[in-house]
Image (cartoon, rainbow, N blue to C red):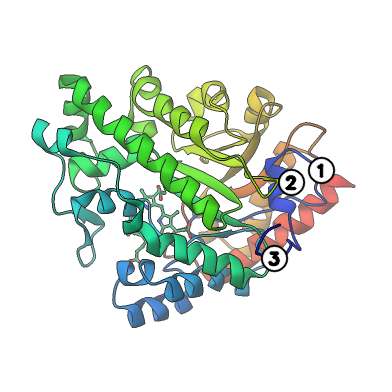
Amino acid sequence: MSQFAPLKNDTFLRALLRQPTEYTPLWLMRQAGRYLPEYRKTRSRAGSFMGLATNPDYATEVTLQPLDRFPLDAAILFSDILTVPDAMGLGLYFADGEGPKFERPLRDEKDVMALQSPDLEKLDYVFKAVTQIRTELNGRVPLIGFAGSPWTLACYMVEGQGSREFHTVKTMLYNRPDLMHHVLSTNAAAVAAYLNAQIDAGAQAVMIFDSWGGALADGAYQEFSLNYMRQVVSQLKREKDGVPIPAIVFTKGGGLWLEQIADIGADAVGLDWTVNLAEARDRIGQRVALQGNLDPAVLFANPEQIRGEVSRLLNAYGAPQAGNGHVFNLGHGISQFTPPESVAVMVDAVHEVSRKIRT
Ligand SMILES: Cc1c2[nH]c(c1CCC(=O)O)Cc1[nH]c(c(CCC(=O)O)c1C)Cc1[nH]c(c(CCC(=O)O)c1C)Cc1[nH]c(c(C)c1CCC(=O)O)C2
């Protein structure tokens, strides 16, 4: 028996498991974030992004904010993928107005060989937040846990920050593939342990974000990103208290490799907005559920256009049939400049139009 309240809305979990649903469930990548004035308020009280993420009370508060505004079908833990390399000792910080950075990036053989899977104690604030969020959700909707892919984490760990060209990490990949593989297998072990601890703490589905897999060449993608996501997925707990825990994998820019991504053992594959949803359904929709894939920029348009684009996507997928399933989402994280009213229009349109398509 679970210590948590029973789920009142399990539409999201059923869609991931390719079971019938009355409508298409949705949630949004980065649904808790700067486009919400209440998020900005809590963030200024906390002082910084990490101040929010490391305090389970704040993390719970901001996780629930988008759900109080919109009838979304899932909550996602408020945290960041870079908490794992931080716990490995790389020293994560956010400089004002810039993205995330590491004080001690992996620069040479000595740095790489010293890398170890982190003591999960150091990430206890994450697991505490998971349990507190699940408790306060009180069965409203399922809670998603997440982690970065081994490759995407390695990009930040070697570059020391975000990058456009990935000069440093790709130099290591081609020049010293042995070192690259050492980083990636350490990351894979860390990510699997981290996701399993989130599942133990109460996460009801998990997602692996491979934001930079699409920066790799064909061949390199399979060797340096996909292989390690497969390792992670194969080590995940797929059940808790007798209930399945679905796993979602998302490679941004992975459209060319959908069949291979669908083959690594996850329940669902996330799609960015460059992918045609009807084609993706035909290619892999009987093997995995699909999640996506509205261009986040659609939310800058007027309500009529938003409803039109939502309807176009839902119709491209069509009515889910036996053996397939669709979770609506954006093709990448929501922009901080999104008007919250546009999100309300989109959420209502997804529920309304998808009910109609089913009848
Ligand atoms: C690459 C990556 C990161 N973080 C993440 C990824 C993978 C997904 C993707 O590709 O977007 C994942 C992430 N980051 C965050 C979440 C929270 C859950 C959610 O609501 O989806 C998730 C799932 C919060 C966050 N993580 C961050 C913010 C903004 C920080 C702030 O409040 O100032 C949020 C809400 C910071 C962050 N963290 C990261 C970056 C590049 C940034 C800066 C982004 C920016 O400035 O827009 C690394």
Of residues 333 and 346, the one drawn nearer to the viewer in this rendering:
333
Vertical placement of 224 versus 274: above or below? above
Which residue is the site of mark 1? Answer: 20
**Mark 2 sits on what residue?**
14
Q: How many marks?
A: 3
Mark 1 or mark 2: which comes first in sequence? 2
Q: Residue at x 42, y 43 (%)?
A: 193
Q: Nearer the viewer, mark 2 or mark 3?
A: 3
* Disc 2: CA contacts within 10 A as few (<14), some (14-19) or many (>=20): some
Q: Are marks 1 and 2 in contact (CB under 8 Å)?
A: yes
Task: Check disc 2 and report its element: helix, strand or loop.
Answer: helix
With respect to residue 331, does 335 lie above or below? below
Residue 281, image quadrant: top right
Q: Secondary structure at mark 3?
A: loop
Q: CA distance from mark 1 to mark 2?
A: 7 Å
- Amino acid at circle 2: Arg
Amino acid marked by disc 3: Gly
Residue 77's disc is none
Q: Residue furthest right?
A: 359
- For the residue carrying disc 3, how many other residues have a C-alpha within 10 Å: few (<14), some (14-19), or many (20+)? some
Q: Mark 3, mark 1: which one is toward the viewer?
A: 3
Disc 3 within 8 angstroms of ligand 1 (CB): no
